[in-house]
């Protein structure tokens, strides 16, 4: 399953709206200007996720995981490599960057960042596509990307797709890259693309 050019452009537009809201929420939380940019959106079978995230696949990552449910349901993750996780924590808290074996403070900060980013991203889909979505409480883990993905899909449908969004955090003249990964079953992805097409039609008819 692939994204058409129209799907891609619409997703980027929706995600930019969501990430704009996330940046505003993070700015309010931290008292400093935070911008979030969406430079890339792609879709891959979950089995190919390692290859698509090659830069972080070989190392441990910090991943904030949140389950969402409704007509479109699945798993959403914010994935940060060791440098991104440490730098983001330092920039947001004014505390020294720490190794990826996160302390309690780091876990709280990064979980809140993930909660804001993932809720803004998935919530924007729900609001603009008229799809009701419920969220679980997010959790954070430090492990290899392969371990994170294997635990998440264990016992579930084997055929799943991952919508991968490359997210650029900009704050204090620094740039940090993270990845939002939204894992969907074929059924949920089909519903999302259908809702997206309906949104495109509504926008074009205005």
Image (spheres, helix red, strand yellow):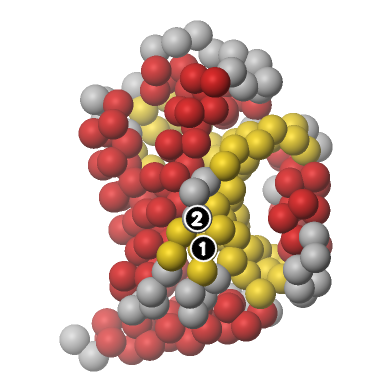
Q: Give residue 75's position: percent from left, percent from top.
A: 60, 60
Residue farthest to the top, as pictured: 96
Q: Give residue 189's position: percent from left, percent from top.
A: 58, 77
**Circle 1 Cα neighbour tier, 10 Å, few/some/many (<14 / 14–19 / ≥20):** many
**Is 6 situated above or below 53?**
below
Give the foreground label among 1 and 2: 2
Q: Residue at x 65, y 16 (%)?
A: 99
Q: In the image, is 196 to the left or to the right of 153? A: left
Quadrant containing the N terminus is bottom right
**Tag on residue 6?**
none
Q: Residue at x 66, y 22 (%)?
A: 100
**Is 34 situated above or below 134?**
above
Q: Give residue 171's position: percent from left, percent from top.
A: 36, 28
Q: In the image, is 201 to the left or to the right of 154? A: left
Is label 1 in contact with label 2 (beta carbons under 8 Å)? yes
Q: Which residue is drawn at 62% across and 21% down?
A: 102
Q: In the image, is 13 to the left or to the right of 67? A: left
Q: Mark 2 points at which residue?
A: 136
Q: Give residue 181's position: percent from left, percent from top.
A: 59, 55
Quadrant containing the C terminus is bottom left
Q: In the image, is 43 to the left or to the right of 17? A: right
Q: Which residue is drawn at 33% across and 79% down?
A: 130
Q: Name the residue under label 1.
A: 68
| Relative depth, front residue between 152 and 117 | 152
Say whether disc 1 or disc 2 marks the residue closer to the N-terminus: 1
Residue farthest to the front, as pictured: 137
Residue farthest to the left, as pictured: 206
Residue 100 seen anywhere in this rendered image of the structure:
yes
| Relative depth, front residue between 47 and 112 | 112
């Amino acid at each position: 399953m692939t994204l058409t050019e129209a799907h891609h452009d619409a997703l980027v537009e929706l995600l930019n709206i969501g990430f704009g809201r996330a940046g505003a929420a993070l700015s309010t939380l931290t008292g400093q200007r935070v911008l979030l940019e969406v430079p890339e959106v792609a879709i891959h079978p979950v089995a190919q996720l390692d290859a698509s995230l090659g830069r972080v696949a070989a190392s441990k990552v910090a991943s904030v995981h949140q389950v969402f449910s409704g007509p479109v349901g699945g798993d959403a993750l914010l994935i940060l490599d060791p440098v991104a996780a440490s730098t983001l924590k330092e920039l947001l808290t004014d505390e020294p960057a720490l190794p990826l074996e996160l302390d309690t403070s780091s876990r709280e900060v990064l979980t809140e960042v993930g909660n804001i980013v993932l809720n803004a991203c998935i919530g924007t889909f729900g609001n603009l596509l008229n799809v009701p979505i419920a969220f679980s409480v997010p959790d954070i883990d430090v492990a290899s990307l392969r371990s994170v993905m294997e635990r998440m899909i264990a016992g579930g449908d084997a055929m799943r797709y991952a919508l991968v969004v490359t997210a650029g955090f900009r704050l204090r003249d620094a740039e940090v890259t993270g990845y939002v990964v939204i894992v969907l079953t074929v059924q949920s992805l089909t519903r999302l693309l259908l809702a997206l097409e309906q949104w495109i039609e509504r926008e074009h008819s205005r």
